Image (tube, rainbow, N blue to C red):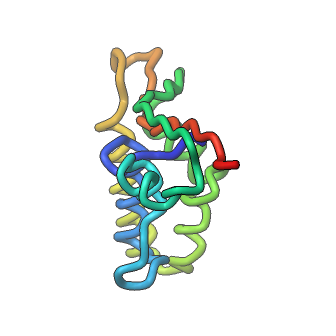
Amino acid sequence: MANWTAGGAMGRLFALLERHAPTRAQGAPAPTDWGDPDHVRSLFGARVTRLETRRRTARLDFAGSPAEWCALYRACFAPVVETYERLGPDPKLLAALDDDLLRFAAGEYLGPLGGPGRYEFEYLLVLAEPAA
């Protein structure tokens, strides 16, 4: 498995989206909990004979600006699309999310301002062998 970590860029993006339009019940686990090696070990327990975890980075080369990244994710990345849909037509709520998403994209942008740029998303690689 490859699971986003809470401390990586994708975890920060999920936290941003959750602040604007919460989807989880109070105290419910976050999807990024699967990016914590201890959490994964506790979930698998004795059901596996071997469990390895390694932190890795997925690199997204992106030639556009942070604003273009936002436009792409707003149109195509399901968690972002869903968050905008949950906010409804309220222009103040939508503008606040627009501002935070652009601030996020600009803050995570790696590379020279004129491009090409890239984004790096940390994930936890999980290798497990089921118990017989």
Please state which of residues 126 and 102 is positioned toward the viewer in this rendering: 126
Asked whether residue 12 appears in the rendered view, the answer is: no
Examine the rendered structure and indicate whether residue 129 appears above or below residue 40. above
Q: Nearer the viewer, residue 100 or 7?
A: 7
Front residue of 80/67: it is 80
Quarter occupied by residue 53: top left
Q: Seen from this angle, which residue lies furthest bottom?
A: 26
Question: Which residue is depicted at the point 51% across and 46% down?
Answer: 3
Quarter of the image for the N terminus: give it: top right
Q: Residue at x 46, y 30 (%)?
A: 65
Residue 116, position as x, y percentages in the image: 47, 15
Looking at the image, the residue that sits furthest to the right is: 132
Q: Count the marks: how many? A: 0
**Along the horizontal axis of the image, is 88 left or right of 106?**
right
Q: Nearer the viewer, residue 83 or 124?
A: 124
Furthest toward the front, the residue is 132
The image quarter containing residue 17 is: bottom left
Question: Measured from the top left, where is residue 129 in percent x and y?
Answer: 63, 40
- State which quadrant residue 93 falls in: bottom left
Examine the rendering and report whether any part of residue 4 can be seen: yes
Question: Looking at the image, is 101 positioned above or below residue 118?
Answer: below
Q: Residue at x 70, y 49 (%)?
A: 132
User: Residue 97 at what x, y percent from top left?
Assistant: 40, 63
Residue at point 48% right, 35% down?
52
